[in-house]
């Protein structure tokens, strides 16, 4: 899948005429959000509810919502990104990378550490809140300061009824209601083709990112690239503190930290493509997929495991 992104990137940088029509690209994005949201709802339906699960979901959702505010402030202070681009980038670091999570799960298993199986439900919930906070950060400038109070119906209506949020949350609720039976009914459509659709989506993202990089090379400054390395470390530290009162196992703590430290390159790019089309994939996708993803796979996951072991002492 990552290689398809590389193919699109290389084709665009080489000035190939390869392209995917905009209407098809948006359809792919909507499909991915439907599938991710539905699977998340099914995950909740399959594990049941207990206090540790509720606490983990609540704190995970809070982290996902708050991390973009930290990332946004750092980006605005250290780079020249616009509010919209900074919000789109920050959203990726509040959400999660399911591929990074799966890789971390294998590391935890290889280390012989048990972990809570319902942690996947926390991963599902942490996909969405960052998109909400990013939309608020991006759209608040369009309104006057006097309109930004809690009674601002226009702003919150735009955020809560944004198409990407409706699809993600709606599919999540449907998956929760219908559970494994619902999953079995739509598996051939929403689950089996997911990897192939993701390849097409990342191919398109590579094309868009490559074309944008040709036009915005100056924007990928050293401070911006550095953000892709230090932001996951900041998020991991916050998650480590939050995980202490949850009483998770060492393996569960490590996976919780990985969720906070990872950066989305599936759900959030799909949402940004629909919700903030003016934001540049050349910036947000290059950072999340080209910088943070390989950093987490090579350096981050072993470091987060050590942090979890230290917390579990």
Image (tube, grey):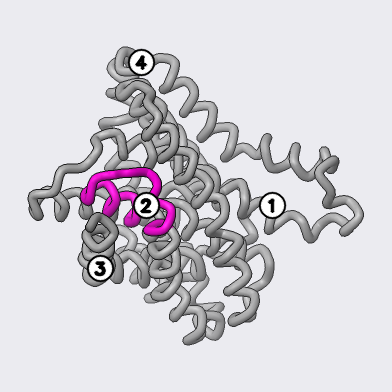
Which marked residue is nearer to the observer: mark 2 or mark 4?
2
Taking the magenta stretch, the answer to whether it contains residue 253 is yes
Task: Name the N-terminal-most of marks 2 and 4.
Answer: 4
Which marked residue is nearer to the observer: mark 2 or mark 3?
2
Residue found 59% across the figure and 32% down from its top: 166
The local crowd at label 2, few if under 14, some if 14 to 19, many if 20 or more residues have their Cα within 10 Å, is few
Q: What residue did someone put label 2 on?
A: 244
Say which element carries label 1: helix
Q: What residue did someone put label 3 on?
A: 303
In depth, the one of 275 and 303 nearer the eye is 303
Report, in whole angstroms, how far the alpha carbon at label 2 lies from the one at label 3.
17 Å
Report, in whole angstroms, how far the alpha carbon at label 1 lies from the one at label 2.
30 Å
In depth, the one of 153 and 216 nearer the eye is 153
Mark number for residue 136?
1
The quarter of the image holding the C terminus is bottom left
Task: Name the N-terminal-most of marks 1 and 3.
Answer: 1
Residue found 38% across the figure and 39% down from its top: 122
Report, in whole angstroms, how far the alpha carbon at label 3 lies from the one at label 4.
38 Å
Give the quadrant of residue 36.
top left
Q: Name the spot of residue 136 as percent of width and height, x first.
A: 69, 52
Which marked residue is nearer to the observer: mark 4 or mark 1?
1
Say which element carries label 2: helix
Q: What residue did someone put label 4 on?
A: 182
């Amino acid at each position: 899948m990552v290689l398809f992104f590389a193919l699109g990137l290389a084709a665009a940088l080489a000035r190939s005429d390869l392209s995917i029509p905009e209407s098809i690209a948006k359809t792919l994005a909507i499909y991915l959000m439907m599938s991710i949201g539905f699977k998340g709802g099914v995950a909740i339906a399959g594990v049941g509810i207990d206090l540790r699960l509720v606490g983990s979901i609540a704190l995970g959702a809070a982290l996902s919502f708050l991390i973009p505010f930290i990332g946004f402030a750092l980006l605005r202070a250290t780079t020249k990104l616009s509010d919209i681009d900074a919000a789109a980038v920050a959203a990726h670091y509040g959400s999660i990378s399911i591929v990074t999570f799966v890789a971390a799960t294998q590391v935890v298993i290889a280390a012989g550490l048990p972990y809570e199986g319902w942690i996947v439900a926390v991963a599902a919930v942490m996909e969405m809140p960052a998109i909400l906070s990013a939309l608020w950060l991006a759209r608040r400038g369009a309104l006057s300061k006097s309109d930004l109070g809690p009674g601002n119906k226009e702003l919150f209506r735009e955020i809560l009824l944004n198409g990407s949020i409706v699809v993600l949350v709606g599919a999540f609720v449907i998956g929760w209601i219908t559970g494994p039976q619902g999953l079995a009914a739509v598996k051939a459509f929403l689950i089996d083709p997911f990897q192939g659709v993701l390849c097409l989506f990342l191919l398109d993202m590579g094309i868009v990112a490559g074309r944008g990089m040709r036009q915005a090379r100056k924007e990928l400054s050293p401070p911006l690239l550095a953000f892709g390395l230090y932001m996951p470390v900041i998020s991991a530290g916050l998650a480590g503190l939050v995980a202490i009162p949850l009483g998770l196992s060492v393996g569960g703590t490590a996976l919780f930290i990985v969720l906070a430290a990872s950066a989305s390159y599936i759900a959030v790019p799909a949402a940004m493509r629909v919700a903030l089309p003016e934001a540049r994939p050349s910036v947000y996708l290059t950072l999340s997929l080209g910088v943070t993803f390989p950093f987490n796979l090579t350096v981050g996951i072993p470091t987060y495991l050590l942090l979890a072991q230290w917390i579990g002492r």
